[in-house]
Amino acid sequence: MPVALGLQVYRSSWVAERAVQSAKRGSRRWQLAIEANVSVPVSNSYVLAVRERGWLKRKGGA
C-alpha cells in the first residue's frame, strides 16, 4: 500500500490515514482508535513514524 494512504503500526497491522480517530498512551504502549470502535496497538518500532504522521496529536493523544 502507498505510504500516503496509511502506515504499518504493528507487525501485522496496517492502518489507513482516514481511519485514525484518536490516540492514547496505555500502560505500556500507544493505541490508535480507528473506525468501528477498534483499538490497534502501536509497536515501539513504529512510534516515531506514527508520531511524524501527527497521529499521536489527535484528540485523545498526549
Image (cartoon, rainbow, N blue to C red):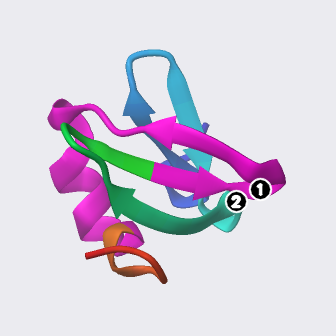
The residue sitting at 25% across, 76% down in the picture is 62
Where does the magenta region start and end?
A: 32-55
Quick one: label 1, few (<14), some, or many (20+) residues within 10 Å?
A: few
Q: Quadrant of residue 20?
A: bottom right
Using residue 26 as the reference point, say whether residue 16 is left or right of it. right
Label 1 belongs to which residue?
Answer: 35
Q: Is residue 62 above or below residue 24?
A: below
Residue 43 spot, x, y in % from top left: 27, 31
Badge 1 element: helix
In the rendered structure, are the residues bearing label 1 and label 2 in contact, judged by CB atoms less than 8 Å apart? Answer: yes
Label 2 belongs to which residue?
Answer: 19
Marked residue nearer the N-terminal end (1 or 2): 2
The residue sitting at 39% across, 17% down in the picture is 11
Residue 46 spot, x, y in % from top left: 24, 40
The verdict on residue 50 being magenta is yes
Using residue 20 as the reference point, say whether residue 46 is left or right of it. left
Using residue 20 as the reference point, say whether residue 60 is left or right of it. left
Residue 35 spot, x, y in % from top left: 77, 56
Name the residue furthest top.
Answer: 12
Quick one: label 2, few (<14), some, or many (20+) residues within 10 Å?
A: few
Amino acid type shown at disc 1: Glu
Q: How many marks do you count on the picture?
A: 2
Amino acid type shown at disc 2: Ala
Q: Who is closer to the viewer here, 36 or 12? A: 36
Query: Which is closer to the viewer, label 1 or label 2?
Result: 1
The residue sitting at 66% across, 54% down in the picture is 34
